[in-house]
Image (spheres, grey):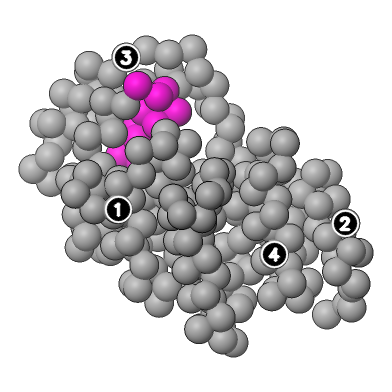
């Protein structure tokens, strides 16, 4: 593993995020010291470029998994750092933080077992509910991401039930990620199918276009395409 000063490491990672494609980044980031790299990636959650922010989110997962493989408690500290950043008392804006937390859990089963219920609690109206729409976007995206890898944990903690109300959000990003999340959770829906279909049929339209990490690579898709995809899946 090459040796970098903190300044050089930051420059190297930010250059990667800005100029290289995601598959290359996810391989290359493994060559940097993980406990220093994670700080640069968390800082990049506030980058002005949306694509860079999403690449940072995607890279955070494997880096946290690297840390957890050698020091699980250090990885827990990072997840708890995300939780603190979502706390109103932190004074932060929570940009990208729920997504980063979810991606960390998606890359390590033990962390997911310990913290999935907390992630879900952020959109549970009787839990640690986050009213801020950008934070809601991240949480519902994170639920969809975790459904790809640990559906049993989402079923255990009743994510399909607790996330239902977000279909009524006035924020089109929240609704778009809700549709994507319920596409990922379709095998878990069970008796909720009729209600989900009803919500999809009543979904307001939007001209929104989205860029997001879909668990494999960055994806560009329109709100209308997501709605069409979801309606077809549940038909």
Q: Which residues are magenta?
A: 170-185
Question: Which residue corresponds to mark 4?
Answer: 39
Up the image or down, 120 lies above or below 138; here it is: below
Task: For label 1, count other residues whose C-alpha is less than 10 Å away and answer few (under 14), some (14-19) or many (20+).
Answer: some
Q: Which residue is at the front of the view, 131 or 30?
A: 131
Query: Which is more foreground, mark 3 or mark 4?
Result: 4
Instruction: Name the mark nearer the viewer: 1 or 4.
Output: 1
Closer to us: 85 or 111: 85
Q: Secondary structure at mark 3?
A: loop
Left or right, residue 197 beside residue 69: left
Please tell me which of labels 1 and 4 falls first in the chain.
Answer: 4
Does the rendering let one see residue 216?
no
Q: CA distance from mark 3 to mark 4?
A: 39 Å
- The residue sitting at 85% across, 69% down in the picture is 6
Query: Which element is circle 2 on?
Result: helix
Q: Residue at x 83, y 60 (%)?
A: 10
Q: Which residue is mark 2?
A: 11
Which numbered mark, 1 or 2, is in the foreground of this view? 1
Q: Identify the element where label 4 is drawn.
A: helix
Q: Position of residue 221 (x, y in %)?
A: 53, 26
User: Which quarter of the figure is the N terminus placed in?
Assistant: bottom right
**Label 2 packing within 10 angstroms: few (<14), some (14-19), many (20+):** few
Helix, strand or loop at label 1? It is loop
Give the spatial CA distance, label 3 vs label 2: 43 Å
**Residue, disc 3:** 204
Coordinates of residue 22 in the picture (x, y in percent) = 70, 49
Q: Residue under label 1, please give it.
A: 128
């Amino acid at each position: 593993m090459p040796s970098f000063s903190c300044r050089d490491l930051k420059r190297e990672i930010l250059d990667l995020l800005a100029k290289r494609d995601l598959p290359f980044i996810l391989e290359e980031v493994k060559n940097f010291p993980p406990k220093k790299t994670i700080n640069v990636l968390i800082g990049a959650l506030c980058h002005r470029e949306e694509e860079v922010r999403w690449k940072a989110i995607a890279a955070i997962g494997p880096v946290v998994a690297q840390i957890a493989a050698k020091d699980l408690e250090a990885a827990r500290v990072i997840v708890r750092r995300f939780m603190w950043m979502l706390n109103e008392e932190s004074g932060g804006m929570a940009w990208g933080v729920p997504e980063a937390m979810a991606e960390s859990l998606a890359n390590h089963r033990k962390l997911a077992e310990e913290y999935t219920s907390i992630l879900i609690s952020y959109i549970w109206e009787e839990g640690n509910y986050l009213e801020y729409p950008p934070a809601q976007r991240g949480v519902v995206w994170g639920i969809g991401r975790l459904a790809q890898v640990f559906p049993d944990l989402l079923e255990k903690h009743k994510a399909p039930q607790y996330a239902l109300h977000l279909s009524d959000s006035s924020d089109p990003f929240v609704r778009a990620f809700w549709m994507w999340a319920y596409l990922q959770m379709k095998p878990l829906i069970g008796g909720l199918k009729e209600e989900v279909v009803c919500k999809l049929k009543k979904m307001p339209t939007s001209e929104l276009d989205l860029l997001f990490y879909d668990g494999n690579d960055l994806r560009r898709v329109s709100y209308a395409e997501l709605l069409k995809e979801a309606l077809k899946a549940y038909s």
